[in-house]
Image: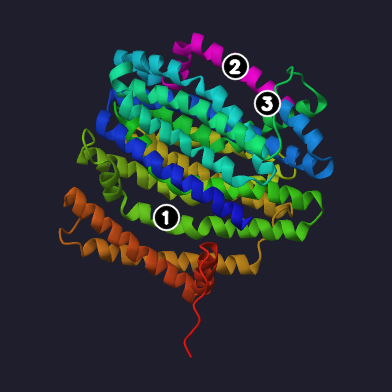
Amino acid sequence: MLRGFLTVGGWTMLSRVLGLVRDQLLAALIGVGPVQDAYQIAFRLPNMFRRLFGEGALNAAFVPLFSSLLATEGPVPARRFANETLSVLIAWLTLLTVGGEVFMPGVLRLLAPGFAHDGVRDTLAISLSRITFPYLVLICGAALVSGVLNGMHHFGVAAAAYVSFNVVGIAAIVLLPPYVGGVAHAAAWGVTASGVIQFGILLYALHRAGMTLHPVMPCVTPRIRMLLGRMAVGLLGSGITQINLMIDTIIATLLPTGSVSLMYFADRVNQLPLGVLGAAAGTTLLPVLTRHLARGEMADAHAVHNRAIEYALILTLPATLGLILVADPVMMTLFGHGSFSARDAVLSGQSLRAYALGLPAFVMVKVLSPGYFARGDTRTPVLIGLMTLALNLVLNLIFMHPLAHVGPPLASSIAAIVNMMVLGIVLLRTGAMHVTDGLISRLSRMSACTAIMGVVVMLCCLLTPAGHMMEMGGTARLLTLGAVMAAAMATYATGLHLTGVIDMGRVSAAIRRRLGLRPTSPRA
């Protein structure tokens, strides 16, 4: 599981870094304003459906069924089930896409009600959304193929394919604007083109893995009926974070122009640790946990779940505190170029702090949810999800006017914390998760090391020559921020080593073995 965790996390990290480059281009070329707002809504629309239907409910329901079939009945029934699922999925999503293209103005009235009073944003958002919406079919198909690969424990290829999204996006932003009417339209065409490429890469990878999928006549077989039933009740449970973010976006369209953009860039930075750690932990944990439970290995299942919690939080905790302490310099260093001003960086940094407060909870929801999905229980996360959805909506309405662009992120973080707590309490009370004294001890030591790291970061910020990194030039700020991060990493790693959470000697030896280097022997 650790090998899969690091593989998925590594490829996801590369994808997120390229995503930051793509977002830097959008910030520099478009800035914060009506055009950026319109594009972000056009991008979030298919992306929301992707994470709900493709990576959310479908993945949570499909992977356990496929893994169980593969383990108990062999590859032929598993391939047949995958073919049936792919055909039903593509047929249904194609109908949904056609309906979305026809009724796009009405769809945006629901998802971006604030645009109705702004003719520029409304017209542009409709145009861009019609370009990006076919991405829904392509990327959900790609998510299914990724689920098959993950069920076969081919984690690397599935994670690597998503790098192409940002590669194609960057190329489109750089090359297409003169031919399609501007940067926003170029970025929109890049989204759809990337879906074609990702789907193709994953189908080829699956063929190389020995399981070629072929479309069949869509038919609701008993297994498909079971899958759809689990998807229906698991839709809210697995996609609660995305639904909460969409509520944030809806509320943001009712705020002053630019709020959608400010929240987007803050969320992109927050998504770096969330996507790398949360997605890696959830993706690799689900099939491993399912296999142990199918074999009746309860002790191993508990141990694997606890280890996944440690893997996820060992980097999430310092990332959370770091983002809170240096949010403004981070936003200015990453996006403070071209049309993105210093004021935009400060405002977006405020949103980032609010998102970062809930970062551990966002990650833990992804780690705790497989505890239900691996047991075929999608009902409980739905009930918990409905409660947190209602809480998020109420908090958004309370915060939106006094806190503006900080309100929706703060509401989402509070809702995620409640979601995490309830998911964990139910797992503990039902015996589906067993927290050992060793886990509590390791998490306590991680938290103490994080606090010490935070003190070092604050001292470094106070000791900078200008007194504050926001006052520096671009190169000086980049170097200073890099030095602060290096000091923070060194402090945290040293603390983990001294407290016995990790053994740096073993880590170093493992890295040397991975690189094919022989350990050096002491001289006589």
- Residue linked to disc 3: 86
- Which mark identifies residue 34? none
* Mark 1 residue type: Ala
- Residue linked to disc 2: 94
Between discs 1 and 2, the one toward the N terminus: 2
Quadrant position of the N terminus in the picture: bottom right
Between discs 3 and 2, the one toward the N terminus: 3
SS type, badge 2: helix
* Mark 2 residue type: Thr
Crowd class of label 2 (few under 14; some 14 to 19; many from 20; radius 10 Å): some
The secondary structure that dominates the magenta segment is: helix
* Mark 3 residue type: Leu
> Residue 89 is drawn in which quadrant?
top right
Crowd class of label 3 (few under 14; some 14 to 19; many from 20; radius 10 Å): many
Can residue 420 be seen here? The reply is no
Residue 87 belongs to magenta span: yes
Q: Nearer the viewer, mark 1 or mark 2?
A: 2
- Residue linked to disc 1: 319
Q: What residue sits 36% from the left and 31% below the top?
A: 171
Q: Is residue 13 above or below residue 36?
A: below
Label 3 to label 2: alpha-carbon separation:
12 Å
SS type, badge 1: helix
Q: Which residues are magenta?
A: 84-112
Q: Residue furthest right?
A: 73
Q: Residue furthest bottom?
A: 524
Q: What residue sits 76% from the left and 19% below the top?
A: 219
Q: Is residue 302 left or right of residue 350?
A: right
Where does the image place residue 443, in percent across and percent down from the top left? 54, 64
Can residue 26 be seen here? The reply is yes
